[in-house]
């Protein structure tokens, strides 16, 4: 019988503690970056804080529930997951339930609740790809039989998300798909062709409308259009410069006073930089880095191909979201509207991030139970 000390080791407390710290810090920064706009728009400075707190409570419940679900269960429902992904994305684009803002239709209105299906689809596609490629190991070197079939589904998902349009999420799904194919053991030439073809599709789509290309290239010289495509990035620069190393002080941001758009969502790290300086930013990056490396370690240690690919896919998705968000905030990459995990305001993103980490923690727990059982068996022998 495994003792209580062994049971405690079955959870990845480093991963769980890091997520709790980051979510709590994110909640505080959502309040700091949004109380002015909350009062202006809704007459309640705590409006966004209370909604984010509600989402954290819901996400905590989801985390606890999904932590108990064996990760192999998702293989049994993988095809309903694919059908649900396609159905929800079709509803967003082609039904009256789709809700639009700033020229994009990305939400579904379900009574008083609005959800962003593409956030759910990001995780669901990882589960699908991990399932399919874990069963194609015998012929993963064959492009037509091993690599290509799942990517046809991904292509359909990609096109539906592009119809919203949401180039950032669509590109993220493609990038994660290519990385999962890489971890599956596909040939380099196949990966090169996939990457080249995907880049060509994205470039063609962006080049089809001048405003799309302007948004993708605007980060290269934001001062060329200070009141247009470069405005948000310039305000982010000002926030970063104002913060310096130690920051202007908690609550002392100037840019959140209607200068920096989306200060509490996609650009929340700019407010962290302004109020808490480089030290605050390093804290966030360190926490996110720990989550990524713990996820990769879980994937490496997992002996089950599905569990391993699932852990890699979730870890890559978190890492890419972080890179895209920080890259946009700092002017290294185009602004794509990708939220910062556990930090940005938004219910759908927070819930899916919590569920994703819960799945990672369950894979870790499953591996620990197997290892503990082997140890007990060795002792018995």
Image: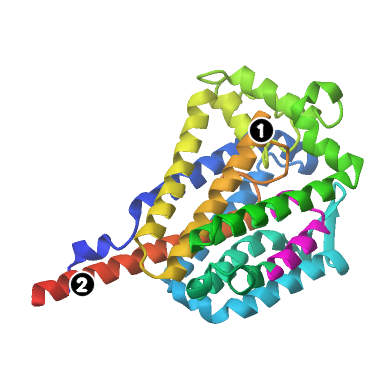
Residue occupying image coordinates x 42% and y 44%: 290
Q: Secondary structure at mark 2?
A: helix
Q: Secondary structure at mark 1?
A: helix
The image quadrant that residue 266 belongs to is top right
Q: Is residue 381 left or right of residue 307?
A: left
Judge whether residue 58 can be spotted in this image: no
Q: Which is closer to the viewer, label 1 or label 2?
A: 2
Camera-side residue of 178 and 246: 178
Judge whether residue 148 can be spotted in this image: yes
Give the overall secondary structure of the magenta segment.
Answer: helix
Q: Is residue 371 left or right of residue 72?
A: left
Q: Residue 297, percent across and down?
A: 38, 53
The residue under label 1 is: 329
The magenta region covers 152-169
Residue occupying image coordinates x 55% and y 21%: 247
Q: How is the image coloured?
A: rainbow
The residue under label 2 is: 374
Camera-side residue of 47 and 28: 28
Q: Residue 277, percent across and down?
A: 54, 23
Q: Residue 55, percent across and down?
A: 59, 56
Q: Residue furthest right?
A: 209
Camera-side residue of 50 and 291: 291
Residue occupying image coordinates x 74% and y 72%: 86
Residue occupying image coordinates x 66% and y 64%: 121
- Label total for image: 2
* Mark linked to residue 197: none
Position above or below: 305 against 276? below
Position above or below: 130 against 297? below
């Amino acid at each position: 019988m495994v003792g209580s000390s062994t049971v405690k080791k079955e959870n990845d407390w480093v991963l769980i503690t890091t997520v709790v710290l980051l979510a709590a810090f994110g909640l505080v920064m959502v309040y700091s970056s949004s109380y002015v706009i909350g009062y202006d728009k809704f007459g309640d400075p705590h409006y966004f804080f209370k909604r984010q707190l509600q989402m954290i409570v819901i996400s905590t419940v989801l985390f606890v529930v999904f932590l108990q679900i064996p990760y192999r269960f998702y293989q049994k429902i993988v095809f309903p997951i694919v059908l649900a992904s396609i159905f929800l994305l079709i509803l967003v684009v082609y039904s009256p339930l789709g809700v639009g803002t700033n020229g994009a239709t990305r939400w579904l209105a379900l009574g008083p609740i609005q959800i962003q299906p593409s956030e759910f689809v990001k995780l669901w596609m990882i589960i699908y790809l991990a399932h399919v490629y874990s069963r194609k190991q015998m012929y993963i070197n064959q492009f037509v039989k091993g690599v290509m079939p799942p990517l046809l589904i991904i292509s359909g998902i990609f096109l539906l998300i592009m119809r919203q349009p949401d180039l950032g999420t669509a590109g993220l799904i493609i990038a994660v798909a290519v990385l999962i194919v890489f971890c599956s053991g596909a040939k380099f030439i196949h990966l090169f062709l996939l990457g080249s073809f995907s880049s060509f599709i994205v470039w063609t789509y962006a080049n089809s409308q001048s405003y799309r290309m302007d948004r993708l290239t605007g980060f290269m010289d934001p001062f060329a259009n200070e009141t247009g495509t470069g405005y948000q990035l310039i305000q982010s620069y000002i926030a970063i410069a104002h913060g310096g190393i130690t920051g202007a002080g908690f609550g002392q941001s100037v840019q959140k006073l209607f200068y920096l758009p989306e200060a509490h969502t996609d650009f929340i790290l700019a407010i962290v930089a302004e109020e808490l300086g480089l030290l605050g930013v390093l804290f966030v990056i360190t926490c996110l880095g720990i989550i990524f490396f713990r996820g990769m370690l879980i994937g490496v240690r997992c002996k089950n191909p599905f569990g391993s690919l699932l852990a890699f896919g979730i870890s890559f998705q978190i890492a890419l979201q972080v890179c895209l968000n920080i890259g946009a905030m700092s002017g290294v990459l185009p602004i794509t509207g990708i939220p910062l995990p556990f930090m940005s305001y938004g219910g759908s993103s927070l819930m899916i991030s919590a569920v994703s980490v819960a799945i990672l923690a369950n894979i870790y727990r499953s591996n620990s139970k197997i290892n503990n059982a082997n140890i007990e068996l060795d002792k018995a022998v």
